[in-house]
Image (spheres, rainbow, N blue to C red):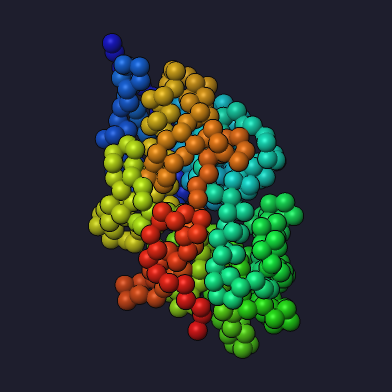
């Protein structure tokens, strides 16, 4: 029986500020190219082409990329890893175009909220796997408690989407941390990029908070830390998500900032690492093997999005082999909605999500430690996922 052709579209931030997400995705696409060249479904062989379009880290460019993939390339499935505004733009464009979309690296509440929906809403074409803001709050609360029990935590949150969601009475941190005895002291919203945190440092002192939590960029957090120390304010622990989940090694200034934050013992969330006990269901690669290969092949440190990029392609392969008709977009979307598979990022199950279209990933706690070879992300708390091996101790700031 002759083979038919399928197309997997990829919207990747190859340029612009989100390019660090594009690097691991590009690497995994090259690594898995032989596995993705064709799939077998129902005894029939389908050749697969992969079409990659640059989002340029821009929502408008991302929408154009989807239109090109859906129209010109005839994509049967679109994959993406992006940021706060780019990822929803890709997902919405796929929903409008009627093409299945699979995405990751974005808390699920933000994924739903930024698209004008609420928990319980069912999208027809778009699927996502990640963690929740509540999962981040639980990991961070555990870290706060390890250095000082329950208490007051200063919140350095911006005036944009991240800050709004973290303050949200339903989605935000307070719903998880208040029952554990923590008081969240909002230090005041700020505009990114920031040029002064004097007011926030003053409020931190006024509240007597000895811990800080944030979702700031590395550059903004480093500025806050420098100004706090200059004012004699020394938090025992800073927890930060978003950009602090992986090192910025693509430019020297960013790498210097990250080294400064490692010296400050900033803690963060960990969703994937070489210490995670998973193996790819597609090619059998372990987390440790993938991280080592990336470092050997690129000369760069492993990145957390690396594991999620691999799982993204594993799930795409699964959907094309499981769909009743992989040449039919609706059939591929249906396969995603019922997908449950083991990946290098763990078990992904869209039949048990916290809301439709979502598969959950567990989180553990990490901390950046200084190292002669550059900042090292150690797993320091595994309360929510004991199967992940600890690779360091939580160290309060000096």
Nearest the viewer among 230 and 253 is 230
Depicted 72 relative to depicted 314: above or below: above
> In this view of the protein, can residue 138 be seen by the observer?
yes
Depicted 154 relative to depicted 35: above or below: below
Percent from the top left, x then y, of residue 77? 46, 30
Q: Residue furthest left?
A: 296
Depicted 307 relative to depicted 197: above or below: above
Percent from the top left, x then y, of residue 3? 31, 17
Nearest the viewer among 230 and 191 is 230
Check the picture and name the quadrant holding the N terminus.
Answer: top left
Q: In percent of the image, x 69 and y 67: which residue is there? A: 181
Q: Is residue 155 left or right of residue 240?
A: right
Q: Residue furthest top?
A: 1
What is the count of numbered marks? Answer: 0
Q: Is residue 353 left or right of residue 324?
A: right
Q: In percent of the image, x 47 and y 64: which residue is there? A: 381
Nearest the viewer among 81 and 292 is 292
Nearest the viewer among 268 and 340 is 340
Percent from the top left, x then y, of residue 204? 69, 78
> In this view of the protein, can residue 221 be seen by the observer?
no
Q: In percent of the image, x 41 and y 56: which residue is there? A: 388
Percent from the top left, x then y, of residue 10? 44, 38
Q: In percent of the image, x 41 and y 54: which residue is there? A: 387
């Amino acid at each position: 029986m002759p083979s038919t052709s399928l197309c997997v579209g990829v919207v990747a931030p190859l340029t612009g500020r989100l390019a660090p997400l594009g690097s691991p995705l590009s690497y995994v696409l090259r690594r898995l190219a032989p596995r993705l060249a064709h799939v077998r479904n129902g005894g029939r062989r389908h050749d697969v082409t992969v079409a990659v379009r640059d989002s340029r880290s821009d929502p408008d460019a991302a929408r154009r990329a989807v239109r090109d993939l859906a129209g010109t390339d005839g994509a049967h499935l679109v994959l993406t890893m992006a940021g706060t505004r780019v990822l929803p733009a890709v997902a919405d464009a796929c929903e409008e175009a009627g093409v299945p979309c699979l995405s990751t690296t974005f808390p699920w509440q933000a994924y739903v909220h930024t698209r004008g929906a609420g928990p319980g809403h069912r999208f027809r074409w778009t699927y996502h796997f990640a963690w929740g803001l509540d999962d981040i709050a639980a990991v961070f609360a555990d870290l706060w408690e390890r250095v000082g029990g329950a208490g007051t935590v200063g919140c350095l949150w911006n005036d944009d989407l991240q800050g709004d969601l973290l303050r949200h009475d339903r989605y935000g941190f307070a719903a998880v941390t208040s029952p554990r005895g923590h008081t969240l002291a909002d230090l005041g919203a700020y505009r990114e990029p920031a040029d002064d945190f004097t007011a926030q440092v003053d409020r931190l002192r006024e509240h007597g908070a000895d811990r800080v939590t944030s979702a700031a960029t590395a550059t903004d957090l480093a500025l806050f830390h420098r100004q706090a120390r200059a004012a004699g304010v020394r938090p025992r622990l800073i927890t930060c998500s978003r950009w602090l989940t992986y090192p910025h090694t693509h430019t020297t200034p960013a790498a210097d900032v990250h080294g400064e934050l490692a010296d400050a013992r900033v803690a963060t969330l960990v969703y994937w690492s070489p210490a995670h006990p998973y193996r790819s269901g597609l090619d059998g690669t372990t987390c440790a093997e993938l991280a080592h290969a990336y470092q050997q092949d690129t000369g760069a440190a492993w990145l957390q999005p690396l594991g999620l990029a691999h799982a993204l392609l594993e799930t795409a392969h699964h959907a094309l082999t499981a769909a009743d008709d992989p040449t039919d977009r609706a059939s591929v979307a249906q396969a995603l909605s019922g997908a449950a598979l083991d990946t290098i990022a763990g078990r992904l199950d869209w039949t048990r999500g916290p809301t439709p279209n979502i598969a959950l990933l567990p989180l553990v706690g990490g901390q950046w430690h200084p190292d002669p070879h550059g900042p090292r992300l150690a797993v320091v708390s595994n309360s929510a996922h004991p199967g992940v091996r600890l690779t360091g101790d939580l160290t309060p700031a000096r």
